Amino acid sequence: MQILDGKIASQSVKEQLAAEVHQLLAAGNRAPHLAAILVGSNGASETYVASKVKNCAEIGFESTLIRLNADVSEEELLNTIRQLNEDPKIDGILVQLPLPKHISEPKVIETISAEKDVDGFHPVSVGRLVQGLETFIPATPYGIMLMLEHYKIPTKGKHAVVIGRSNIVGRPMSVLLSSNHPYGNCTVTICHSHTPDLAAVCRQGDIIVAALGKPEFVTADMVKEGAIIIDVGITRVEDATAKKGFRIKGDVAFDQVSPKASYITPVPGGVGLMTIAGLMKNTLVAYKRTLQ
Ligand code: GUN
């Protein structure tokens, strides 16, 4: 069993990005600039956005964090996005999800200019992904593909079972793994809450991508010997003995599943770090288009 280490793989991507930014700056260009909007103060969202901002600084990107109160009106949020769309100094825009219930996420996503949609959630980006056209790939599935690439894990002809059909992970992941490219060409099954005998389906998977957000859902009996296990879960589970009062748990019961796996991503230290690498790559692409 080999651990797929997100720290090592994301560091490698970030070093490439930092080198490219260094060259662009040396040639007299401005730095790439990501704008992140955080509505309210959800603990997990705060952590993710802080990490995105920190990673921008590490590789030489500029970033702007816009904080809005949880009771901000939908119109005010949409207007903030429209201003960023018009701002030539901003290359990428992300609105951290989830949003408060009174705000329509689809409306927010559609208001972000497709040219600055570095999260890859805009219907134009999704449509292009499905058609195999160049696009912004949603950061988490993109990060997983970068992880497979870093460790040179062959995927062609394998049966990939994706658990979860979210727009953020499951659905785009299923498209990427089935696409015709070096780390695709899988036969893909996408499972969800209405899949009968999900364990039996999982046992057919040469690759399992667990992205349903249920801590330790995937147990050893659901996994074929030698499977490649990609754990996308990052749920905070209360634990009075932990320093912060919670522990981060993946969707895979790591201790029992890892002895059966050929490769497995840990949580934390796996896919989460790759998500940021994917976002940074998208931001650099958006920026480079403005130079042309
Ligand atoms: N919430 C959970 N994952 C993501 C992500 O990749 N992007 C944004 N904007 N929000 C998220």
Image (spheres, rainbow, N blue to C red):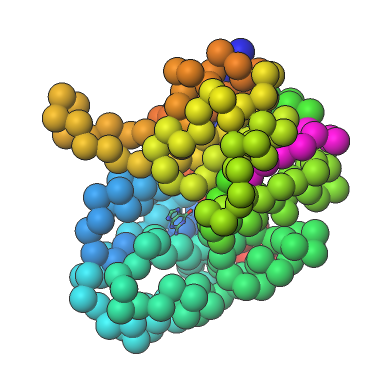
Magenta stretch holds residue 230: no
Whether 170 is drawn above or below 85: the answer is above
Q: Position of residue 126 (x, y in %)?
A: 66, 66
Q: Quadrant of the N terminus?
A: top right
Residue occupying the point 45% across, 18% down: 255
Q: Position of residue 82 (x, y in %)?
A: 45, 81
Q: What residue occupies the far bottom of the structure in this picture?
A: 75
In the image, 202 versus 114, the foreground residue is 202
Q: Quadrant of residue 113?
A: bottom right
Whether 125 is drawn above or below 34: the answer is below
Magenta stretch holds residue 158: yes
In the image, 29 versus 101, the foreground residue is 101
Residue stretch in magenta:
155-162
Q: Quadrant of residue 10?
A: top right
Q: Position of residue 217 (x, y in %)?
A: 46, 36
Whether 146 is drawn above or below 286: the answer is above
Q: Is residue 26 visible?
A: no
Q: Is residue 152 visible?
A: yes
Relative side of 19 to 160, left or right: left
Relative side of 177 to 56, left or right: right
Residue occupying the point 67% across, 19% down: 225
Q: Quadrant of the C terminus?
A: bottom right
The quarter of the image that holds ligand 1 is bottom left
